[in-house]
Image (cartoon, grey):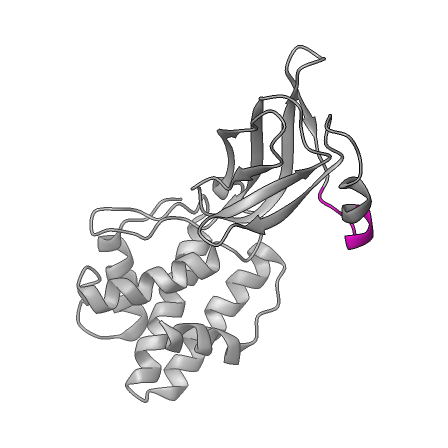
Amino acid sequence: MATDLTTLAIDIKDLTRWQLLPLTDTENLARLNRMYRWMATLTEFPEFRRKDVTRSTTANTGTVTWPTLAFSDVRAVELQDPDDNDEYKLVPKARSELDWAVAALEPNGWPWMWQDGHDGTNNQIEFRPIPDFAKTVRFTGYIVPTALGASDSTAFRTREMDDALANLFAGDLLLRRNQMDLAQMRLSSAQQIIRRVTGREIQIVELAQVAQAA
């Protein structure tokens, strides 16, 4: 469930056995956001699944600028089919460079595949064969959430992930103050929650590195 920074600060106070920490100051908020955004990428959380339809093809042009939505993992790229009432049809990602090269020799029409690209300025998606029509591209995937501001709440659906975030932040604070035994306890709690919710086995040392990098 969404948890605001005031509640997180109280949780962290209890976990560290210190005075209340202002999470809204620049340094603490930057650290919290580093951990929060990293945790959001650990599994396919439905709360971070998004669709984007802000991009369209141009007839007889193979490239489309990548959407501004901050996808961490794109799971599907679809195009409207002009020959089927503009129904969205899946276009798979290129499986190999050989397939990609062969598709470049085909006449313009319905694309068989797509690949990531860059024009020196913008990230792009490129289709082959080149579409001979102008239709909407639909991207589906998982995003990295925007950084939390002072009045924001986390986007996790489950309170458990907010508990993991509080434990991770508390573990970082304790490490910085050389309270190693209590830091180990807090990081271990974060580890156990993450394992239970995501099925991922994150080592304590990795959690400490995430925290310390913030």
Find residue 151 and report its horizontal and vertical position in percent: 21, 47
**Residue 108 versus residue 188 in the image, above or below:** above
Q: Residue at x 42, y 57 (%)?
A: 37
Question: Range of the magenta residues?
Answer: 93-99
Tell me the quarter of the picture where residue 163 sits. bottom left
Tell me the quarter of the picture where residue 81 sits. top right
Find residue 132 and report its horizontal and vertical position in percent: 67, 24
Find residue 183 and report its horizontal and vertical position in percent: 39, 80
**Residue 201 versus residue 59 in the image, above or below:** below
On whether residue 158 falls in the magenta region, the answer is no
| Quadrant showing the N terminus | top left
Q: Residue at x 82, y 44 (%)?
A: 102
**Residue 17 versus residue 68 in the image, above or below:** below
Residue 24 vs residue 88: left or right? left
**Residue 174 versus residue 163 in the image, above or below:** below
Between residue 21 and residue 185, name the one nearer to us. Answer: 21
Residue 214 vs residue 121: left or right? left
Q: Residue at x 45, y 55 (%)?
A: 161
Count all numbered tags in the image, as a single digit. Answer: 0
Q: Residue at x 73, y 34 (%)?
A: 129
Find residue 41 and report its horizontal and vertical position in percent: 52, 55
On whether residue 95 falls in the magenta region, the answer is yes
